[in-house]
Image (cartoon, rainbow, N blue to C red):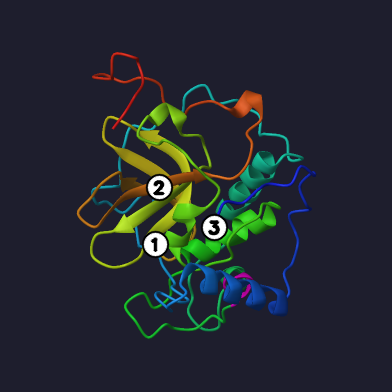
Amino acid sequence: MCQIVIPASRVQNPSRTVTNSESSLTSRQTDSNRFPGGYERGLRDGDIGTGFYGGSGGPGSTGNYVQYNQPLNPPPRDTLYGSLDYVLQQALSQDWSERGSPANPLIKNCYLLCGRDYNRDGQEMIYAWCAAFVSYMLEQAGIPNLRTMGSQVYANYGKPVNWRNLENIRKNDIVVFKSKTRSGGHVGFIQAIDPQNRKVACLGGNQDNRVNITNYQFDSNSQYILEVRRNWEIPTEFDKPLVRSITGATASGAATV
């Protein structure tokens, strides 16, 4: 329903700024299409997690993450995939800490892209911007996106990845988690997989009130992986699985869950 076709042209300069009027219009159109009855209109969604690097503990703080045969050099920035990889790595080096009001300018830009002001919801998820961060990273990379603050909207974005065969997952694929306790969930970009412990390292926003790489279980007491999606072509050199077969894999040699 939200299938998006990537144009054949080269990527845009990843410093494009969206005007308030443009983002507001797009956000209203997206909300109208996704939630015609007003359900979860303007949802700001995200879950707090422990950091991947030097995490503060908890069930997701450790894991055996080994990327399979990934090239040492970064992907070419004149491709959509390379541009996305670049802006994600840049984000990790920036200060995305949540400071409340006045807003961190980087976080505020994510809100503005989605046609929202930076303010409190008045609900449980007071400041929740994981989907806005995904939208903003895609925008900066020149990739069509949904400009939404609802994580579950990305469950229909681009093309699905058959993630239960773990060999199909690639670095920077979008992972959508569904909460078991509320209507929303979480969304971010996959960086690594631990198939033996059933964990995924997710680069995302609103993780410990900032941008970082956080460990999440495939299926925990609070949430589970709903979808893995992709909306770009991957250069051949970088079209490599993050994991290969593991102990106890299927007869075909594919790692599955």
Which callout, 2 or 1, points at the residue further toward the start of the chain? Answer: 1
Magenta span dominant secondary structure: helix
**Which percent across, then down, holds residue 91?**
59, 54
Which callout, 2 or 3, points at the residue further toward the start of the chain? Answer: 3
**Which percent across, then down, holds residue 220?**
23, 50
Q: Nearer the viewer's eye, disc 2 or disc 3?
A: 2
**Left or right: 120, with 239 as reference point:** left
Q: Residue at x 43, y 73 (%)?
A: 43
Mark 2 — residue? 227
Q: Is residue 116 above or below residue 85?
A: below
Type of amino acid under label 2: Glu
Type of amino acid under label 1: Asp
Give yes or no for residue 231 being in the magenta stretch. Answer: no
**Neighbourhood count class around disc 1 (C-alpha, 10 Å): few under 14, some 14–19, many 20 upward:** some
Of 44 and 154, the residue lying toward us? 154
Q: Residue at x 59, y 49 (%)?
A: 88
Q: Quote the CA–CA distance across marks 3 and 1.
A: 16 Å
Q: Which mark is residue 63?
A: none
Looking at the rendered image, the quarter that the C terminus falls into is top left
Q: Is residue 2 above or below residue 149?
A: above
